[in-house]
Image (cartoon, helix red, strand yellow):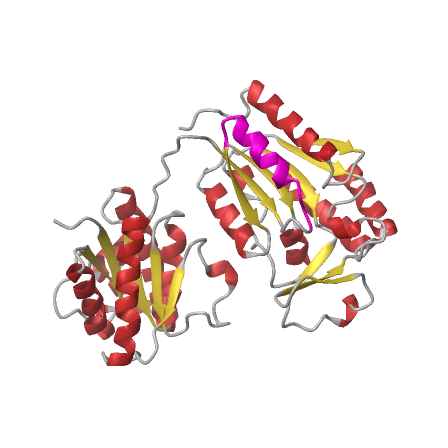
Amino acid sequence: MSDKTILIIGTYDTKNDELDYMAERVQAMGGGVLSMDISVLGDPSKPTDFSKHHVAEAGGSSIQAAIDSGDENSAMQIMAKGGSLLARKLFDEGRFDGCVILGGTMGTDVALDICQALPLGVPKYVVSTVAFSPLIPAERLSADIQMILWAGGLYGLNSVCKASLSQAAGAVLGAARAVEVDTGSRPLVGMTSLGSSCLMYMKKLKPALEERGFEVAIFHATGMGGMAYESVAAEGGFACVMDFALPELGNLLAGSVVNGGESRMLQAGRAGIPQIVAPGCLDLIDFAGWQDIPEQYQDRPFHAHNRLIKSSGLNAEERRETAREIAKRLKKSSTPAHVILPNQGIEEWDRPGGEAYDPEAFAAFCDEMREVMTSPLTFSEVECHINDQGFVDKALEIFDAWVADGTIKQQTS
């Protein structure tokens, strides 16, 4: 009897030996194995648990359709769709506890879709020839994906690639054994923030919400954190959200790579999760530390946070645009959304004398917020800075009222 089962996925027509090697390593450590073939043209040396025909048919297509599609990209997208749907179905049925997927660029392309189809907390490992490569955009990465470079393994087994393959096999089985499954004992509040040198409300809100019987998960709004937050929201994982750090939205509009994806500020509303929102740190555009600051931003207020991230200020019209975009996205929500505007500042560096202090641009932003935050949104303006106690008090006032009237559910489903 094995304690945990690992789903092993790959193109068995070209990587049979490597996939079988990982299966052997998992089994040698006491794990169980299910195999899924996502190849199109060839066949494995022995039948897999889920054949390429199963995969294609799970996506409403067929292997013949993949062959007839005319090119390998179209064919593999058929397998990506089927593989994603089949993997999610198998997980929901309790058939496996973690997965590991092997691939070059083709297999990795499929692997990224499959990993995004699986919930947060399911161990998901990708062994890839392009792991950590700039070929992989951040929005393709699932919230808790793990990757390892498949060095020296493009064609056939050898001592170099076995190091990667065996590590992946051990890692995914170990993760499946170690992961703490969410029991849903307390309803979860999702909160966005940045480090406490910039935004500080979470220091007071987290204990206050925990005293009320809620669990709090705080997501770092630097791109990947926002994507993780949105993925949990899409699964209906929150009782309420406090989306108080929105730089990823401004970054998205400005074309910065430090963004939370196109679905930022949309998934909670789609999932019917009530939202309390504030525009924390929406006065800055973030750049990767290795980037040169574009010329149009070089005369703006500037803050070098560390060697990984640096920021320039948004001008008045750019801030007005962010306000309009917040309203546009929140008005798509199927449940209540309450926007709080702290009219004395939205991050620590915009206080008088700070590096990002720009009162004219901030005034333009506040004016636009007052103009666009209309029904069905609820809008409150507070005479304080976002890092002041008055902001925390207002957020808790809204939260408590929603708990009292049943908007926020105190019991998990």
Horizontal side of residue 352 vs 189, given as left or right: right
Q: Residue at x 61, y 27 (%)?
A: 399
Q: Indicate yes or no whether the magenta region holds residue 396.
A: no
In this view, which residue lies farthest toward the right?
360
296 in relation to 93, above or below: below
Which of the two residues, 165 or 10, is positioned nearer the viewer here? 165
Which of the two residues, 75 or 117, is positioned nearer the viewer here? 117
Q: Can residue 251 be seen in the rendering of this structure?
A: yes
Q: Residue at x 30, y 67 (%)?
A: 102
In this view, which residue lies farthest toward the top?
405
Q: Which residues are magenta?
A: 198-214
Horizontal side of residue 394 vs 33, given as left or right: right
- Residue 127: image quadrant is bottom left
Which of the two residues, 382 or 332, is positioned nearer the viewer here? 382
- Residue 11: image quadrant is bottom left
18 in relation to 92, above or below: below
- Residue 6 placed where, x, y %? 24, 55
- Residue 96 placed where, x, y %? 24, 49
Q: Residue at x 29, y 79 (%)?
A: 160
Q: Indicate yes or no whether the magenta region holds residue 202.
A: yes
- Residue 268: image quadrant is top right
Q: Residue at x 62, y 22 (%)?
A: 401
Q: Can residue 376 be seen in the rendering of this structure?
A: no
Horizontal side of residue 11 vs 339, given as left or right: left
Q: Quadrant of the C terminus?
A: top left
Horizontal side of residue 26 vs 350, given as left or right: left
- Residue 259 placed where, x, y %? 60, 57
101 in relation to 273, above or below: below
